[in-house]
Amino acid sequence: MASIVGSAVSFARPVKAINFNPVSFSGLRKDNVAFRLQPVPQRFAVCCSAKKETVDKVCDIVKKQLALADDTEVCGSSKFQDLGADSLDTVEIVMGLEEAFGISVEESSAQSIATVEDAANLIDELVTVKSS
């Protein structure tokens, strides 16, 4: 059985003056065409689950630790690497965040931090756990 995968298939009706045999059209007839529809996963992204105050404070700390100019834009999606941070700078940023927020970040968690959002999300989680 033949199958056609696509988003649109049209079957023209044969003109009565022409003797059209549906079987002669490459073996396909309207009653033996199969459509295979596959679900498309819905893509969504949470912008940032951290509090705005946390993100703003992390941005300030990152700017201070990296000695960035005042006109340098640092936002939630800013990657430390794009801001010029190397691995030592990232460690210093994490240490500054620990001091500012009164938390302790495990080494495995610190290695997963690549953006300001990552840091802010982790901080909010740690602060919530600490206050519980």
Image: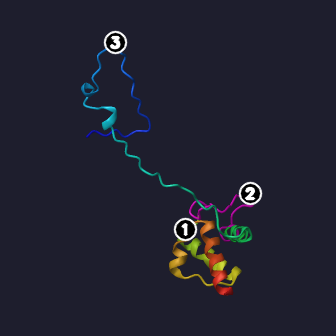
Density class for disc 3 (Cα within 10 Å; few <14, some 14-19, many ≥20) is: few
N-terminal of the two: label 3 or label 1? 3
* Helix, strand or loop under label 3: loop
Quadrant of the snapshot with the N terminus = top left
In which quadrant of the rendered view does residue 123 lie? bottom right
Give the Cα separation between the discs numbered 1 and 2: 21 Å
Kindly identify the residue that appears in the image at 41 percent across and 33 percent down: 9
Give the residues drawn in magenta, as a range. Answer: 63-84
**Seen in the image, is 67 located left or right of residue 89?**
right
Is residue 77 within the magenta segment?
Answer: yes
- In the picture shown, does residue 30 fall above or below 80? above
Quadrant of the snapshot with the C terminus = bottom right
Q: Which residue is mark 2?
A: 71
Q: How many marks?
A: 3
Instruction: Give the residue type that dot 1 points to.
Output: Asp
N-terminal of the two: label 1 or label 2? 2
Q: Which residue is mark 3?
A: 17
Give the Cα separation between the discs numbered 3 and 2: 77 Å
Q: Which residue is mark 1?
A: 86
Density class for disc 1 (Cα within 10 Å; few <14, some 14-19, many ≥20) is: few
Nearer to me, 17 or 28: 17
